[in-house]
Amino acid sequence: MERIYNFSAGPSMLPVPFLEEAAADLLNYKGCGMSVMEMSHRSPVYEEIIQDAEAALRKLMDIPDNYKVLFLQGGASTQFAAVPLNLLSKSGKADYIVSGQFSKKAYDEATRYGDINIAASSASSNFSMIPEFTMKDIRPDADYVHICFNNTIYGTKFPEIPDTGSIPLVADMSSCIISEPVDVSRFGLIYAGAQKNMAPAGLTIVIVREDLLGKARPETPTMLNYTIMAENGSMYNTPPCYCIYIAKLVYEWILSIGGLGEMKRRNERKAALLYDYLDSQSYYTAPVVASSRSMMNVTFVTGDKELDKKFASEATKAGLANLKGHRSVGGMRASIYNAMPYEGVETLVAFMKKFAEENPKEN
Ligand SMILES: *Cc1c(COP(=O)(O)O)cnc(C)c1O
């Protein structure tokens, strides 16, 4: 069967070469007589898998030695609670930059645990850009500052890593992790649900600086306690074994093509193709302010809700799936994560041109 181009925001496409590898090993993983799904997480074979996964991610992201890598469950949404429970350790204050729905959810969840402030928000511009802020907007005694680095729903991304001085910066990177090199040392903590750019749903990655461990609030559930998870090598309980295995193959795939520098080059090339087309015509509009554009999630509208609907349904018939925008914003969104090939975006742009010709707007 032919594979289609899947522009879903998540779960999303995975790279074919390693899907083939996973399929080949499905019934009998390297002579074990069983699949990775069926083996004990305490077996030597599996221990090697999880260790290799961590080693590959460390190499890929150039993670410094004073950071722990955790393989957790519960999705990025569980981190909305885990972050304040583990990090509200001194003043009990944290400052949040609200740049979209997920950062608003993170903020709402954190307010249950401490004195949480919105330092900046782009809600008034309908989240069409990343809000600007300086150190003056941050309380000097905040335990951390939280951002969502790439806003999956609106298609915006921080143009650079904000400087929060000595206050730890915490970033939700669910929809942009391993899409390009990032200086991990600029962050106190990075977290990401795996289903956008790394693996199937069910795995959450946390990368946390060691000096932030050991300060969780007493009521922190064991399963949300980073220190306990770190001490147990992410195996306090059964980890999401198969997802971690898939993540390992994805990391190794990116390393094999040249690492995150090459991944970025490919992603930039894809995003440029789409944005250049959007900028060159007037049938479609890209609502995001140019300096805040995401390389992973590209949003656009025709300005006519009926045409938007028709676009998404005709695109699906043409083998371009899941282009409908998020239910809260409408329009269209093309998620072009690592696994989306350049040809997928070329096919999308060709379809957009054809659709514009065949569906002239009245007026
Ligand atoms: C998808 C997404 C989430 C929610 O992730 P879950 O794993 O479903 O909880 C949170 N933040 C961002 C930026 C996302 O893209």
Image (spheres, helix red, strand yellow):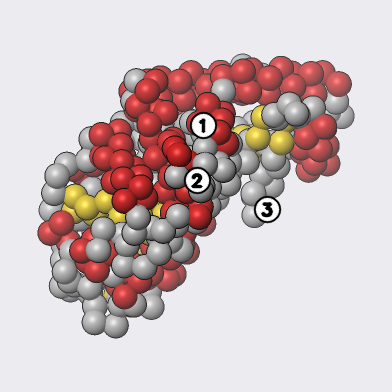
Q: Amino acid at mark 1?
A: Glu
Camera-side mark, 3 or 1: 1
Q: Which quarter of the figure has residue 248?
A: top left
Q: Which mark is residue 33?
A: 2
| Vertical relation: 239 (above or below) 298 | below
Q: For the residues carrying marks 2 and 3, which lies nearer the camera in this image?
A: 2
Q: Are marks 3 and 1 in contact (CB under 8 Å)?
A: no
254 lies above or below 13: above
Quarter-wise, where is residue 3 in the image? Answer: top right
Q: CA distance from mark 2 to mark 3?
A: 45 Å
Q: Is residue 18 above or below residue 31?
A: above
Amino acid type assigned to the residue bearing label 3 in the image:
Arg
Mark closest to the chain's N terminus, 3 or 1: 1
Which residue is labeled 1 in the image? 21
**Amino acid carrying mark 2 in the image:** Gly
Residue extending furthest toward the bottom = 219
| Residue identifier under label 3 | 327
Asked whether mark 1 lies closer than 8 Å to ligand 1, one says no
